[in-house]
Each structure stands twice: as structure tokens, then as C-alpha cells.
Image (tube, rainbow, N blue to C red):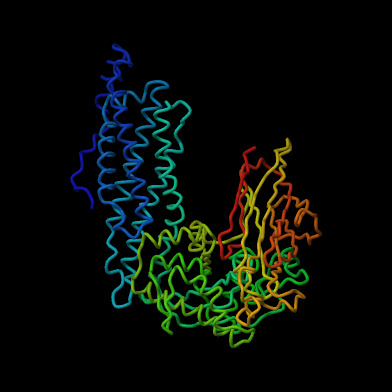
Amino acid sequence: MSRSSVRPRRLSRPQVLIPSVVALSAVLGIAGATVSAAVEAMSVREELVSVLPELDAIRAGVDGVGTDAIDPAAVERAGDAVERALASTRRPDWWLAERVPVAGANFEAVRTAVEAAHVVVDEVVEPVLALSLDGLAVDGRLDTGRVGRLARTSARALERLEEQVARLDRLDRSALLPQVASALGGLDGPLREAASLAERLAPVLRALPGFLGEEGPRDVVVLFQNSAESRALGGIAGASVLVHVEEGVLSVTRTLGGADFVSHADPVVPLPADADALYRTEGYAAAGTSIHEVTARPDFPYGAQVASRLWQESQGVTPDLVLAVDPVALSHLLRATGPVVLADGTEVSSDTVVDELLNGVYRDHPGLSDEANRAQDATFTAVVQALTSQLQAGSLVVPRAIGGWVQAVDERRLLAWSPDRVEERALELAGVGGALPERSSRSVPFGLYLADAVGSKLEYYLRQQVRVRAGSCDVDGTRTVTVASELSNTIDTEPELDSEAFDYIAGFHEREGLPRGWMRLRVMAYAPDGADIRSVRVDGAEVPYTAGSDDGRPVAYLVVTIAPGATVTLDVDADVSGSAIDAVRFAGTPGVRPVEVDNVVEPC
């Protein structure tokens, strides 16, 4: 696939010729001396433009069936075009042309873009695609040494990619000709998209050998988030497994359900005082008091520490890593491993796992008994066991795994925490830390988090649309932000809602005084620190709410009820001060179905 190892010789910068060239330009004039460079620049621009479709083809291949989907000819064409362009930018007349006032900025920009493209092809695409993935697993044992070398090589390549994007960012484009600006603009898109991927993957690749036990045995707790019963971070955490990693062997050594842990009256890990008061609001289960509530507060480092403490208490195990995943994240991973077969012979694939784990299992094991609950948990843990075996066998299509990872991270369906500070920092940089979001100098975070109040699995039928808007910027730096959410209950599409098969799905509706199939959701609206929540409206009418805060962030807490087939609109208005707000970052509870977010916030 790769081109010949014989490369065109790199031309050194013409240091010896500089005095004579400068003297010549003084006599003949710089315009005449740069005519050939200007002609050559048009050819270089054409070479650069010709690379763009090849980079798109390579990028499309990464999202395809596997490395075979990446067209080797596209890689070779891209490399050849970049080599020709690079050679032109190393010529003495080009060096001189860069030093011409005003016009020189165009030559410098083109050279920088060509050098960036060269690094991408020569030091990122070709080396990474040349990595051999064969033999990573032998006799059910991962070669952790090879995995570590591959991971570190890939991480270095991705970091080089980030460096090149940073170089392009530093260019002053205000004086560029339209043709040059257009060529750079075409290169920006693919490079920035790839750099965004690199930013998330490189830290975790560097930490991967440690996660896989390169320096000693590891105990990893995997929490299964059931997003059919909402909690702030995604879903209630009931089933969990312990994966022991040692000398390349991944073993599921324990599988537990919610009943295997003790519930507490007070949080087992102290909360900030204001958050403690907020989460003791009447009718709301206190965060951090049980395994079911480790995801109740939208701060995974806190929830993971609670889970770690509960595992210590129940099993005498102190986890080295705590992960949380939901079935949708598992479906993304199953695209890379292919279907898995459970111990009972059931086959689960990326197309079926969500429906099976979040709906079908409750029809197979109906009723509100402990026996049904344990049978359901056993199905969840069986999927994790089967996936672990598949991964240990090396049955993984890497490009699909990368795509699945990115999608799960983007949707906040994959969370991780480590008690080790260095590892935890890598997880934060990789975007899986799941901490309460912080405001930055130019953007602020808003969150709308949900929790089921019926003990049901009705959120399988929840659809959510969010709109984020901001008013004009006042002279004092204050701006009003409105977060509006439409919450729809679609269980009316089920003709057998009143049958026994839906007993567990409908939950304890009678306890709540609700007809069967009605949703009741606890809502936590988080505004950034320094903001003032002005009002909350339900279906256009202002409603009372409990005002509180979480570690200084204002929070509005209320309960909404949604009939089958109905839609409830929730609007939260907040004044944000302290700086001009150019962007609002929305974070919410990842649902079974993707949350549609329409974010239209113009810069001040």
C-alpha cells in the first residue's frame, strides 16, 4: 500500500545563496526575482487542491468496513502530490518570494499548508496504516507489549497532526489572495476534523498500556447504565462487573446486581454542602447513597468514587478504574467486534442490543419481583462478559472501533475515572471524564438532567428535542440564555401497554398516583456559576421550582408528568453575567434515542 521508501531528497534552505540573491534583488528588483516563484505557486496550489479529495477518501475509509476500505491508491496519490508541492516550496526563488512585503504572506501560507499536508500523509496516515494488527492476541492473551508500542506510535502520530493544525491557526489570513485562502480553507476542514479526533484519542492511547496492565494487574469495575430508567448521567446503575486484567488476560471475575450492595441514609462520599442540600430535596433520592444513585448527580468523578467505595464495602475490592457504559455505547462497540453469542445461545448485534437490553429483557422477565430483577441484571452482565471475551481474542476492526469510541464519547455514553492522577488527567483530555462542566472565557455550560420518578423503564419511549437561544449582549456583559426542551412520551405506540409484559416497564405508577404508561421525570436545570435563573415555564406557563445550587452552580429542580402520546415543553431562562458569551455548551442526559439539539447562539 505504501509508496517506495525512496523519497525525493529534501532540499536544504539556501543559506549560502542568501547574500548573492539579496544583492541581485537589490539590482534587478524583487518583482522580477519572484516571477518564477509566482508561476510555481499556482502549480503548488493545484497540487494542494488535488490532495483534498484524496484526504476525504482516506477519511471515508476510516469510517468504512476496515483498513481494506482505505484506498491505497488514494494514499499514494496524496503523497505524490504533496512531495511535488513540497519540492517547489524549497526552491531559492520561493524563499525570496516569502520575504516580499504583503505578497510574501501568500507564499508563506502555501508553504505552511504544504508542510502540514506532508506531515499528515508521511508521519500520520502512512505510519499508522502500516501498523500490523495481526497477532495482538495469541491463545486468548493480549500481547500487552505490542499493544503498548502500537498505542504510543499512534499517539505520537496524532500529536504531530495537532501540531500542524496549530501551525495553520497561527497564519495571518487577512492579507491572503482569494485563491490561496480558498485552498487553505479546503485543507482546514479535513485537518481540523482529524485533529479533533486526535485530541481525544492521543491521551487515551498513551494511557492504554497502563489500563491493560502493562505495569501490573488491574481491577476494572464496569457499571451498566440503564438509560430506559433515566438518571442525570444517562441511566440507573444496577448491574456491574469486575474485570481483572493481568499479563494480557481479561477475565470477568464477578457480576453483581443492585441487590448485592447496601443502601445508605447519607452519601458514602461527602457532597459539597449546597449539593447535599439540593439532593435531599423531598422526593428525590440522595446522590451517593446507593449503587442505583451513583449516576444521579451529573459529575462522574463523584459517582465513580461512590461506586468504588461501595465495591470496597461489598466485595473488598478497590478498583483501579471505574467505567460506565450504556447499551447504545455497546452497540457502537459491537460494530467493531461483530455479533456476540451469550451463554444461553442468544446472539446480540449492534442492531439488536439496545432493544434487547432496554426493552425486550423486561418482556422476557416481566413483573416487579427480585427474581425478575436478577434475571434482567444477568442478561446485562452476560453481554459484557461476551464482549470481553471477544476483545481478548483480538476480534476487533480497529477503524470501526475508533468510530464507535468517538461516537460514544461525543454522546457522553462512555465515562471513566481513575484514582491515579496521571491516568485521570488522560481520561479528562480524552473527553470521558464526565465532570461537572466549567465555564470558559468565551463559552458557558448549561445542563438539563433527567431522573425517572416512577421506578419504570418508560424512558425507552422518551424523545427529546432541545433549543438553545441567547438574547442581545448588554453593555455590562449580561446576556439572557434560554434552554427549551420538548419531552415526548411515545409509549402510546405500543398496542400491548396494558398486558402483563409491560408490568416492569410501567413501573410503580400506582404509588405515584398515575395511570399506567405516564412518565414522571425529575428535572435538574444547571446554569453556569455566576448566572441567575429567572424563570421556569412548562407549556408556556411559569411554574414554581426549587432553587438550589451544586458547588456554586445555580440549579432549578422541578417535576414534570407526561401522558402517553403527549409532549411537554420546558423552558429555562437565566441571566449570565461576567463576560461576553459567544457560545453556550449544552449537556444533558443521554437518552435511548439521540437528543436533538438546535444551538443557535451568535457571538456578541
**Residue 447 coordinates in the image, percent (x, y):** 65, 56
Q: Is residue 37 left or right of residue 286?
A: left
**Residue 557 coordinates in the image, percent (x, y):** 74, 62
Most distant residue in the top direction = 27
Q: Is residue 402 left or right of residue 560?
A: left
Q: In which quarter of the image is residue 392?
A: bottom left
* Frontmost residue, 435 versus 329: 329
Q: In which quarter of the image is residue 274?
A: bottom right
Q: In this view, does 188 lie to the left or right of 146?
A: right
Q: Quadrant of residue 135?
A: bottom left
> Which quarter of the rendering shows the C terminus?
top right
The number of discs equals 0
Residue at position x 32%, y 40% in the image: 51
**Residue 104 coordinates in the image, percent (x, y):** 38, 24
* Frontmost residue, 482 versus 581: 482
**Residue 88 coordinates in the image, percent (x, y):** 27, 31
Q: In this view, does 94 lie to the left or right of 350?
A: left
Residue at position x 25%, y 48% in the image: 73
Most distant residue in the front direction = 495
* Frontmost residue, 269 versus 329: 329
* Frontmost residue, 296 versus 182: 182
- Against 47, is 410 above or below? below
